[in-house]
Image: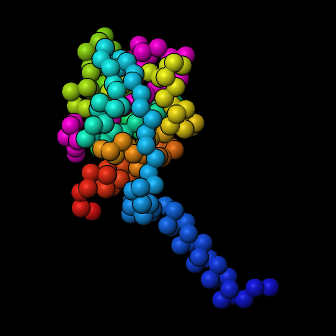
Amino acid sequence: MPSRRFNAAVATMALLTVGTFVAEPYLGLRPIESLKAASPFVLATIDNSTFSLTEENNGSVVILDFMATWCPPCADQAQELERVRPRYLPQAVKIVTIDVAYSEAPADLRAWRHHLYDPEDLQPYANDSREAEGWFYATDTTAELVGPSFNANALPTVVLIDAQGRIRQTWTGLVLAPNLEAALDIALGRPA
């Protein structure tokens, strides 16, 4: 039977390992050179424009929000992004919500967005674009396959791409606004 001292040492090492794993994205412990370049893509948005990662990421930080309209945690993730959006200029941080459910049409995403922000309003939802605020909505296509290229195998998945086009952080599952803001501040070079 191991001694109490041995058990305490193992428990401490386990806590330090888990703590380092959890804190690493926020402390910038990974060297910048080891960050993977984001795969470029171009998607038509539901507001009749085009989002090109290469063009929009040129000097801007980009958040990719992979979701589906049938996914309840994805609606929660959108609310967390809504809390983050006002803290950053649209030129500095772009958000792209990408519906990866190939069976859904752009109209499904348009209706989801409209009712997400105004659930009581049953009027037509033709003109509630968020692109002027730096928030784009698009549906993934089997021709582009953006979700799989960013390993969005579970929903929601959020990917943070820095201004140089490198993937800084990937979260699977709901990520809260304070965690997003901390990672964004690091990517933008803001003091903690």
Instruction: Pick the quarter of the image with the C terminus.
Output: bottom left
The percent position of residue 9, horizontal first and vertical second, equals: 62, 83
The percent position of residue 51, horizontal first and vertical second, equals: 33, 25
Q: Is residue 47 left or right of residue 5?
A: left
Q: Is residue 108 visible?
A: yes
Q: Is residue 184 above or below residue 41?
A: below
In magenta stretch: residue 102: yes
Q: Residue at x 40, y 22 (%)?
A: 43
| Front in this rendered view, residue 159 or 15 | 159
Q: Is residue 147 above or below residue 142?
A: below
| Front in this rendered view, residue 28 or 127 | 28
Instruction: Pick the quarter of the image with the N terminus.
Output: bottom right
- Marks counted in the figure total 0
Task: Kindly indicate the quadrant of the structure image that contains residue 41.
Answer: top left
**Residue farthest along the front direction in this orientation:** 33
Q: Is residue 120 above or below residue 191?
A: above
The percent position of residue 46, horizontal first and vertical second, equals: 35, 17
Q: How is the image coloured?
A: rainbow
Q: Residue at x 54, y 19 (%)?
A: 142
Q: Is residue 30 left or right of residue 12?
A: left
Task: Kindly indicate the quadrant of the structure image that contains residue 24.
Answer: bottom left
Q: Is residue 115 above or below residue 179?
A: above
Which region shows up in magenta? 85-112
| Front in this rendered view, residue 34 or 103 | 34
The percent position of residue 53, horizontal first and vertical second, equals: 35, 31
Q: Is residue 15 left or right of residue 106?
A: right
Q: Residue at x 50, y 37 (%)?
A: 150
Q: Is residue 8 left or right of residue 191?
A: right
Q: Is residue 74 visible?
A: no
In magenta stretch: residue 109: yes
